[in-house]
Amino acid sequence: AFHAVKPSDMLPELQGRLPIRVELNGLTEEDLYKILTEPVANLLRQQTELLSTEGVTLQFEDDAIREIARMAALLNRTVENIGARRLHTVIERIMESISFEAAEMEDGSETVVDKALVKERLSEVMVSSDLSRYIL
């Protein structure tokens, strides 16, 4: 009975019961970079606006954004592929001390996140990720 019918011809109640399998590719470094830069309310803008409530101006350099995307893609390949959610954990690690110190900074002060800062904050994550493979 179903050989002459397309799923779109069926009742919506039946459409939802048909098994559909789709194979997806993991997000690449370029995909993660686009996620960080293209949406209007991206994670970087959220962090910038969050610190602006404390009177601190936050800027991310382009090479720092690319490094964040590279590290997130690398962690997704080596530890566990959690997709774009990895960006949140990476940015949280970078912003942890900056957010904590923002209340103590003077109004109008400026903080710049560059590639060196990203590497410094994520260096221990990369070391601990190597050890996580050997823990049962």
Image (spheres, rainbow, N blue to C red):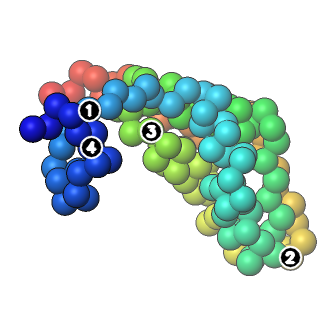
**Three-letter amino acid code at disc 3?**
Gly
Q: Position of residue 30 (x, y in %)?
A: 65, 29
User: Secondary structure beneath disc 3?
Assistant: loop
CA gap, disc 2 and disc 3: 36 Å
Dot 4, crowdedness within 10 Å: few (<14), some or many (≥20)?
few
**Residue drawn at x 34%, y 27% as measured from the top left:** 23
Residue sitting at the far left: 1
Residue 79 visible from this viewpoint: no
Q: What residue is shown with label 2?
A: 107
Q: Is residue 135 left or right of residue 106?
A: left
**Disc 2 versus disc 3: nearer the observer:** 3
Q: Disc 4 designates what residue?
A: 7
Q: Earlier in the sequence, mark 4 or mark 1?
A: 4
Residue at 18% across, 43% down: 18
CA separation in Å, label 1 and label 2: 53 Å
Figure quadrant of residue 1 = top left
Q: Which mark is residue 83?
A: 3
* Coordinates of residue 87 in the picture (x, y in percent): 54, 44
Badge 4 vs badge 1, beta-carbon distance below 8 Å: no
Tell me, yes or no, whether the two marked residues, 3 and 1, touch with CB atoms within 8 Å: no
Q: Is residue 81 left or right of residue 1?
A: right
Q: Nearer the viewer, mark 4 or mark 2?
A: 4
Left or right placement of residue 36 versus residue 87 in this view: right
Instruction: Report crowding for label 2: few under 14, some 14 to 19, many 20 or more residues within 10 A (C-alpha).
Output: some
Of residue 7 and residue 49, the one placed in the foreground of this image is 7
